[in-house]
Amino acid sequence: MTIWQPAYVGLGSNLDDPRVQVLAAQRRLGELPVTRAILHSPLYGTRPMGTIPQPDYVNAVTALVTQLDARALLQALRGLESEFGRPAVHERWGPRVLDLDLLVYGRERRDEPDLTLPHPGIVERNFVLYPLADIAPDLDVPGLGRVAELKGRVAGDGIRIL
């Protein structure tokens, strides 16, 4: 018997009507095989990371339960990004139609070249922690702590609820 695992996915877009892209991606996450979308955070407007001039982002987090293992879920997320028009090779911290990050998968901790769990950027990214705190403030991120506490350590500069 396959066990259902909780997973949290960060969504972001700053091209081609980002709000529409994020909402469509949230809907598609719930259509992945043996996966159910349980909760969607509100949408947030955020400033881009890095030094590349680009439009602001729309970000959100979706909570899933899935029978896919972490690697299969990550592959499904990459497939969705591709369907939405994201090229396989892209500029780090550059503009994008859709970015999907596997933030947390159950209690798993991994540090592999193509899959790190929990996502290594969680603790410093307000555009992840604010929406994640809206749907899972008491989530214990493996090895990092409770989401509400992590959120309290990052500034709210450049982020607004839409």
Image (cartoon, helix red, strand yellow):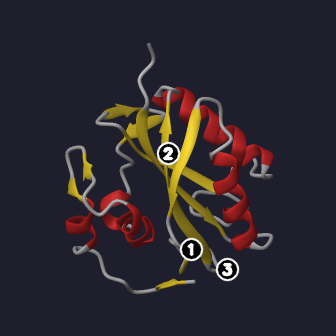
Amino acid of disc 2: Leu
Secondary element under disc 3, as helix, strand or loop, is: loop
Residue at 39 percent of width and 48 percent of height:
119
Residue corresponding to mark 3: 55
Q: State the image quarter where residue 30 is shown.
A: top right
Distance in Å between CA atoms under marks 3 and 1: 16 Å
Amino acid of disc 1: Leu
Q: Which mark is residue 72?
A: none
Of mark 3 and mark 2, the one earlier in the sequence is 3
Residue 140, position as x, y percentages in the image: 23, 51
Residue at 37 percent of width and 66 percent of height:
129
Of mark 2 and mark 1, the one earlier in the sequence is 1
Q: Which mark is residue 64?
A: 2
The quadrant of the image that shows the C terminus is bottom right
Residue at 50 percent of width and 66 percent of height:
41
Res. 6 visible in picture: yes
Residue at 70 percent of width and 73 percent of height:
19
Residue corresponding to mark 1: 43
Amino acid of disc 3: Pro
Residue 64, position as x, y percentages in the image: 49, 45
